[in-house]
Image: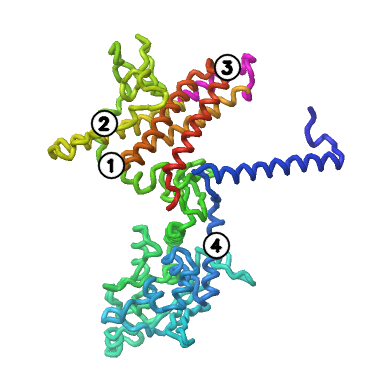
Amino acid sequence: MSDCSDMEYSSDNECEYDDYYNTGTEDIDIEHHNALKTDPESFEYDCLSVEDVDKLLNESIECLCNTINCAPSLAKTLLLEHRWSVNEIVKRYRENPTELLTSARIRPLSHSPNQPKETPTTAATSGSATLSPMSSDGGSVHSSTLSCKSSLGNRSQTGDSNRYSMTTTMAATTITPTTPSIVATVQTLENRPNQSLCSVCAVYQTLDKFHAIPCGHSYCRDCWSTHFETQINQGISTGIDCMATQCNVLVPEDLVLTLLCKPHMRTKYQHFAFQDYVKSHPELRFCPGPNCQVLIRSKELSPKKATCDTCKTVFCFLCGMDYHAPTDCKVIKKWLTKCADDSETANYISAHTKDCPKCHICIEKNGGCNHMQCFSCKHNFCWMCLGDWKSHGSEYYECSRYKENPNIAHESVHAQAREALKKYLHYYERWENHSKSFQLEQQTLDRLKQRINEKVMKGLGTWIDWQYLFTAAALLAKCRYTLQYTYPYAYFMESGPRKSLFEYQQARLESEIENLSWKFERAETTDRADLENQMDIAEKLRITLLKDFFATCA
């Protein structure tokens, strides 16, 4: 068949092909829209690059700067404090601008002996932006002047492009110190004209080497620079505050970037600052994948499944941890903490071998399915409870339920502790078992790929003919993953009708998953229609459980 580039089509044929592909695109959009309605795990989100996020944050900064007439560095501090809600900042600005600045640690709470009055003389080599909040009657309440020079990335601001980068280069700001003790010292020193004593390093410096922040505290350039480097090396950037005792006023970003002389320290500061901005933004999440630079954005703040387009990492959008439906974020954190604390106690259950309950021969689990068949006596039993597989029945997978002692409240403290440990180990063993089954089923899939490849090479069908097996493997992994996270959910549930309903649905799901796993491991001898029917049953039970018990609200 010749290449597409060598083929000639009439204009009518081209229109027909355009209509065909456009129709396909509409079908995909309809399917995606339907998935958002029917799948409790689906939601709208976008995968963004660092540049895209930088642009997004700049738009908020520019909007706030234009609305309340402030410097970009001041806008960043306010947005960081208010989780990037421009409307909330503007509302508070109109109600009480003084309280807005003090709550954001831009101005001191009150003037005390350790907080000199903010009346320094400010000389800046670049343009200045002044925030002048107005009172309800139109009068000016106060004025806070911050000098700045902004740029987008490494490009300077030119023409009508009024954009403010997260990487801002500020010009030097020279402030004459007016702390009473320093001024008095300078005035009494006839042999040190135009000099002042830095209260940190106790060295006399010329006045042009001193820099002050809005609280009025002034120190020499070298002391500020050392303070900044120390804070940055500790991972602090937007939270760098004043060096004065009992003063929590934040140091403006422009002053930090002005006094940091080492390029690698400036880069480090900007990197930490960008991380702080993203972490404070409610709609943004870093992809937790190793060395992945992608960021996820969604306006729906819910614990749903986000998948990175680049590294394919799957995680919970709300908390950033491994995806954990139907368990909510708070419960899974409690569960993981408990597992870490009790890991030594649970070590004995980590072995892969158990004895056959009939012939007592040692058996190793080498697949994901919990339906075991002894190689020696052919006895079918459950790996979890070692009970006869026939006794499990098709409707209720009894060994997934923990039978609590109804009289445990009247027992001794030691008896209650033993019962609590027994309950924990019951759920932990099943949690850990499904995690290992998930890994073993991946190995089964690898072996299946090799066998299918051999069949294709022998002419026994094509890869397309065997594609349904890979679909079954993907569905089995998804169901197994959901089932694993039902055990932390059940562990922390209060006893009652709702827990009974949950355990019923959990048991049915587990039963059908084991049936699916059994048929998948014997896929070459299993009827395709039977396997696909089992897939449909397992997926419907999984979706039903999630719809009934997965809290998708933050």
Vertical order, 410 against 202 (above or below): above
Which region of the structure is painted magenta? 443-464
- State the SS at label 3: helix
Label 2 with label 1: CB-CB less than 8 Å: no
Residue assigned mark 1:
338
Q: Amino acid at mark 1?
A: Lys
Residue assigned mark 2:
347
Tell which circle, 2 or 1, labels the residue nearer the N-terminal end.
Answer: 1
| Quadrant in the rendering for residue 221 | bottom left
Label 2 with label 4: CB-CB less than 8 Å: no
The residue under the point 37% across, 11% down is 378
Residue assigned mark 3:
454
Q: From the viewer's perspective, tell me whether residue 278 is left or right of residue 215.
A: right
| Residue 429 inside the magenta-drawn segment | no
Residue 212 visible (yes or no)? no
Percent coordinates x, y for residue 174 in the rendering: 42, 79
Q: CA distance from mark 1 to mark 3?
A: 46 Å
Question: Local crowd at mark 3 within 10 Å, few (<14), some, or many (≥20)?
Answer: few
Residue 474 visible (yes or no)? yes
